[in-house]
Amino acid sequence: MAKKVVAFRKVKKKGRLGLFMVLLTLGVFVSMFVYNGRELRRQKEELTEETQELEKELEAEKERSEELKSFETYTHTKRYAEEVAKEKLGYVYEGEIIFQKDQ
């Protein structure tokens, strides 16, 4: 009978080692999941901030686009052509009097 007890004790020690290895492996996996979860949350926050910045830029570009469209419409008017002719080319209407400052 003594041999059976010794054999049982050896099996019991091997069982503890196996349990320890399983628990160690489980601990490593849990640690990896926790670390990866934190990393994913950090990345999500960064992407959320970047998305908000890009949405602001998009709104600014939409406003700029509207301004350019209205300027394009204005440049096709007779009034704009007259302003450019007067300011940049120095044209005047016949009979129009121009006053200039002495320099």
Image (cartoon, rainbow, N blue to C red):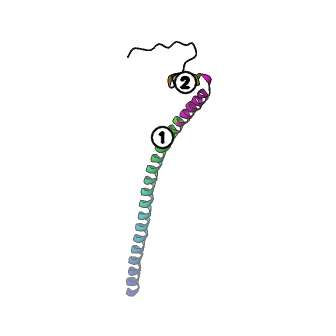
Q: Which residue is mark 1?
A: 53
For the point 38% across and 77% down, the residue is 13
The residue drawn where x is 54% and y is 32% is 63
Residue visible at 44% across and 57% down in the picture:
36
Q: Quadrant of residue 92?
A: top right
29 in relation to 14, above or below: above
Q: Secondary structure at mark 1?
A: helix
Name which residue type carries label 2. Answer: Ala
- Residue 11 in the image, given as x and y percentages of width and height: 41, 80
On the picture, is 36 further left or further right than 83?
left
- Taking depth in this image into account, of 24 and 31 the one nearest to the observer is 31
Q: Quadrant of the C terminus?
A: top left
Residue type marked 1: Glu
Q: Quadrant of residue 30?
A: bottom left
Left/right placement of residue 74 relative to residue 88 reads right
Q: Which residue is mark 2?
A: 85
Q: Does dot 2 land on a helix, a strand or a loop?
A: helix
Instruction: Tell me whether circle 1 and circle 2 mark residues in contact (CB < 8 Å).
Output: no
